[in-house]
Image: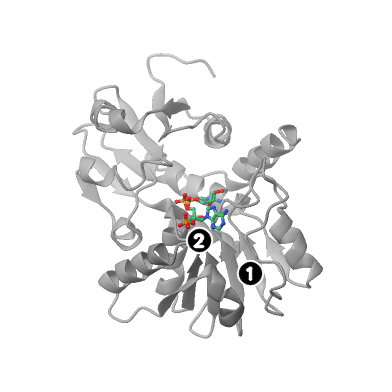
Amino acid sequence: MSIDGQTQLVGVIGWPVAHSLSPAMHNAAFTYAGLNWRYVPLPVRSGDLATAIKGLPALGFRGVNITVPHKVDVIPLLDSLTEAVSIVGAVNTIRIDRNTGHLEGLNTDMTGFLADIAANNIRVNKVSRVLILGAGGASRAVAAGLVRSGAHVIICNRTLSKAQAIVKFMQSSWAHPNIEAASLDDLPHVTRGVTLIVNTTPVGMWPDVDSTPWPEGVPFPSGAVLYETVYRPPKTRLMRDAEKAGLRAVGGIGMLVYQGAAAFEVWTGRKAPVDVMKMICEQELKENEN
Ligand code: NAP
């Protein structure tokens, strides 16, 4: 489909964005849906974020994704926020009203994670005990979704204060959130009864593919499921180790696809072709495999 005066623009703002799978995923979805839309990578440094965001309505953009390192800093630059943003504390999608230029901040990482665990038949409820490794942006989105589903959540992080900060934030959003913080050194003492482990650290991500965030000598909780948010490579060392220990391991490509699908639907008002988006991501990952 050619680019012309009717082409609608969306994109991803981050630093860096060169390796993002989102342009390929969204452009394939637009083509499949017969929409004259294009998704472009927009590398923006922190010092230029405010200027870039303010300029989007004037340039006619219909929306953008926001990625590392801008997911929190973008919040004060927006006109309104959804409930998901207030419980996660981060924005990964902006919708722009084409008539008024109103900028609405959303978080589709949380819904993307919840949609993918549901698609993989991973049930989370009041009797679930979930261990989250890491306390960055992805951890916040995952923790918010899990707390909302009633699970007992343990955030285990190398820097304990960051895990405690997430617990404090969740306590400001819910009356009695079932959530606690632990340091990575405490891991052997908190795995008992864990039904789901979610890795939200980047450890094991390409090119550091031989690393794992799981400390040596600590047994995996038996019968648990491992959800890995890293998707490059599609099967990380942590997933392989967990499988060897008899756990079921699920990779993070689905979370990426569902957060993208939610953004597609918010921008276009059309149902996202999830299967096409997933196929393109898997294909891109395979082509760039080393
Ligand atoms: P972030 O904000 O930088 O947080 C990273 C967290 O990992 C921090 O808590 C950090 O601990 C911990 N960490 C980093 N290196 C570590 C190490 N060597 N050992 C132990 N802990 C370590 O990053 P993020 O935005 O949350 O993203 C994290 C990962 O999630 C990314 O790699 C990405 O692949 C994945 N992700 C996937 C999706 C998806 O759709 N599948 C979406 C979002 C993110 P400290 O606090 O001690 O520094």
Q: Is residue 194 visible?
A: no
Considering only vertical position in the picture, is 5 above or below 223?
A: above
The answer as to whether callout 2 falls within 8 Å of ligand 1 is yes
| First reached walking from the N terminus: tag 1 or tag 2 | 1
Considering only vertical position in the picture, is 214 above or below 236?
A: below
Could you say which is closer to the camera, residue 275 or residue 136?
136
Q: Which residue is at 48% across, 29% downward?
A: 35
Numbered label tally: 2
Could you say which is closer to the camera, residue 257 or residue 167?
167
Q: Which residue is mark 2?
A: 134
**Secondary structure under badge 2?**
loop
* Label 1 Cα neighbours within 10 Å, binned few <14 / some 14-19 / many ≥20: few
Quadrant where the N terminus is found in the figure: top right
Q: Which residue is mark 1?
A: 121
Q: Which residue is at 57% across, 36% downward?
A: 21
**x and y percentages locating residue 5 in the rendered image:** 37, 14
**x and y percentages locating residue 36 in the rendered image:** 46, 25
Q: Which residue is the extreme one toward the right? A: 244
The answer as to whether callout 1 falls within 8 Å of ligand 1 is no
Measured in 3D between alpha carbons, the distance from the residue under mark 1 to the one under mark 2, in whole angstroms, is: 23 Å
> For residue 225, which quarter of the picture?
bottom right
Quadrant where the C terminus is found in the figure: top right
Q: Which of labels 1 and 2 is toward the front? A: 2
Disc 2 marks which amino acid?
Gly
Disc 1 marks which amino acid?
Asn
Q: Which residue is the extreme one toward the front? A: 185
Could you say which is closer to the camera, residue 156 or residue 49?
156
Q: Is residue 240 visible?
A: yes
**x and y percentages locating residue 104 in the rendered image:** 27, 44
